[in-house]
Amino acid sequence: SCNRLRVAFIFDQYEVAMEQLEEWNMHKGYLQKAIPGIFTITNIYFHCALTCISMAQKTKKRKYRKMARSFARAIEEWVDNGNPNVRRYDELLKAEFASLDGKGPHAERHYEKAILLCGRRGMRNIWALAHQRRGEFHLREGNDDDALYDINNAIRLYEDWGAKAKVEQLKEKYGKLLEPLSEIEATHFSIVH
C-alpha cells in the first residue's frame, strides 16, 4: 500500500494516493506506530505530505493542508534531531507550503535549496521531482521560461534515473511548453537577446 501510494503520487494520481493514505490512517500516525523504526518512513511521510499538498492545491480544502502539516512536522522533527537525510524533503515541503500561501519569493528560495541538496547527494528521483514541482510552480506563476528550464531538467533527471514512463508522462503533459520555438520566434529571440 505504501508503494501504491508512491507510484500514484509519482504519476500525479493524487486521488488514488489519498485513498491509500486515508485507508491506512497514515495521517494519524498509524504507520509509524504499526511499524516503528522502518527506515523508509521518512520517504513515505514525504510522499504523504506532497500528496496532501497536491490535493490542497487541487481542491482548496483546508483538511488536506492540515494533514500535510502533520507529515511535515514529523520531517521537521527529524531534521531538528540531526537526520541529514531528510533536509531535502524539508526544504521541498517548505517550498510547497510557501507556494500554497502565495509567498513566491520564499517558495523559490526553498525550491533552490531542495534542488541543491538533492544534487549534492545525487538523489536523481527527488532532484527530478524538485525540478518538476518548481516548474509547476513557475507555470502557476505565469513564468513559462523558468518552467521550461525546470521541466526539461526534470525530464533529463528522470531519464538518468531510468523512469521512462515518467518521462513520457511529462512530455505528454507539457508537450505544448516543450515544443521547439518556431522559426519566427527563434529569429526574434536571437535578435532581442
Image: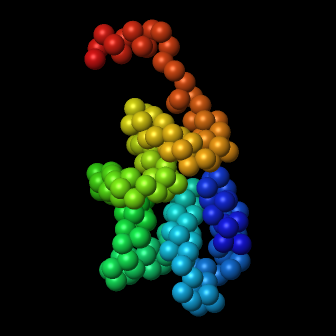
- Depth check, front residue: 51 or 127: 127
Decide if residue 146 is in sight here. yes
Q: Residue at x 66, y 76 (%)?
A: 22
Q: Residue at x 36, y 72 (%)?
A: 84
User: 81 left or right of 31?
Assistant: left
Residue 49 x, y percent position in the rendering: 52, 69
Q: Is residue 148 above or below residue 131?
A: above
Residue 113 x, y percent position in the rendering: 32, 56
User: 75 left or right of 106?
Assistant: right
- Depth check, front residue: 143 or 6: 6
Q: Residue at x 45, y 47 (%)?
A: 131
Q: Is residue 148 above or below residue 42?
A: above
Please identify the quadrant where the N terminus is shown: bottom right
Please identify the quadrant where the C terminus is shown: top left
- Depth check, front residue: 85 or 2: 85
Residue 55 x, y percent position in the rendering: 58, 61
